[in-house]
Amino acid sequence: MRAALLLLILSLAATAAQKSTRTCRILFIAAPESALKTLHLFDGRTTQEVELTRMGFSPIYKISPEAVSLALLSTVPPTTTTATSAAAAVPAGAPTAGIAASIRDFYLIVCSDPANQVAPVKMQVIDADAANFKPGQMLWFNLTQNTVGGYVGTQKLAINPKSRLILEAPADRLAEYHVNIGFVAPGKERREPLCETNWFHDPRSRSVLFILQTPGSIIPRIQGFPDFRDADPVMKN
């Protein structure tokens, strides 16, 4: 009886610890060559140096469970003990993003903002909780003014300009699949080819894809990043 009770207590404690843990991964999209490689992420209680990775997601970072806002800073802010002092520690104009209390795991999507004098970036929080974004699924962002559509394996893709959607797994197993995607430019009716190739599906991994407008070209491009999580991921901070 005591052993069963102890196991129950340990199980409840583990569940509570898991619910109180909050994590994120960072991705710097379309970063210029001169862009910073690291910045300081401030969550209102703690500050940590984070990698602004370009070719894949950053390591997994722990974030304070009580955080309601995040800021990226070029220097470490003063130590804070209250919400009021935390707000005062963030320089005016710093890139910030709010975070809902319900979000336990998220992506911090960063892009260049040379006009910002505090830190030359801007950022957006994207909910990545496993209940909403499952292994095998694809999260698409269309950051262009083009309408994009076609077939991604077994799935039909249709995504409007400046929007995002989650696409179900393009295959039902570890396998190669065919991709045929086109786009319609603003003010045009004719569909132009964008991408026809084969991609590889790993049902253990989530995929995040961006449709970007290449400077000086009318043809957009697709950039994708896998998010594979080990059973016991290594987390920073």
Image (cartoon, grey):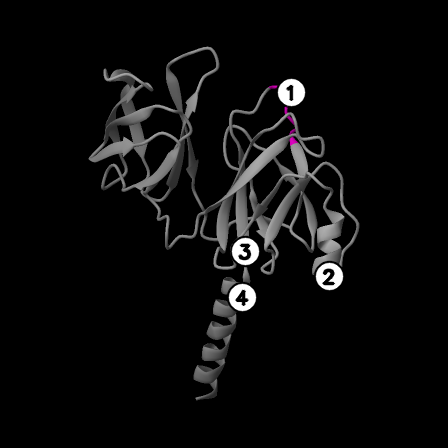
Q: Which amino acid lies under the numbered mark 1 shown in the image of this protein?
A: Ser
User: Is tag 3's residue or tag 1's residue first in the polypeptide sequence?
Assistant: 3
Disc 2: which residue: 82
Q: CA distance from mark 3 to mark 2?
A: 20 Å
Q: Which amino acid lies under the numbered mark 2 shown in the image of this protein?
A: Thr
Disc 1: which residue: 34
Residue at position x 46%, y 84% from top?
5
Residue at position x 45%, y 78% from top?
8
Disc 4: which residue: 17
User: Is tag 3's residue or tag 4's residue first in the polypeptide sequence?
Assistant: 4
Query: Image check: 213 left or right of 169?
Result: right
User: Is tag 1's residue or tag 4's residue first in the polypeptide sequence?
Assistant: 4
Q: CA distance from mark 2 to mark 1?
A: 36 Å
**Mark 2 Cα shell of 10 Å, populated few (<14), some (14-19), many (≥20):** few
The one nearer the camera, 15 or 33, is 33
Q: Secondary structure at mark 2?
A: loop
Which one is closest to the eye, mark 2 or mark 1? 2
Disc 3: which residue: 22
The one nearer the camera, 56 or 234, is 56
**Mark 4 Cα shell of 10 Å, populated few (<14), some (14-19), many (≥20):** few
Q: CA distance from mark 2 to mark 4?
A: 23 Å
Question: Which label sits on residue 205?
Answer: none
Q: CA distance from mark 1 to mark 4?
A: 40 Å
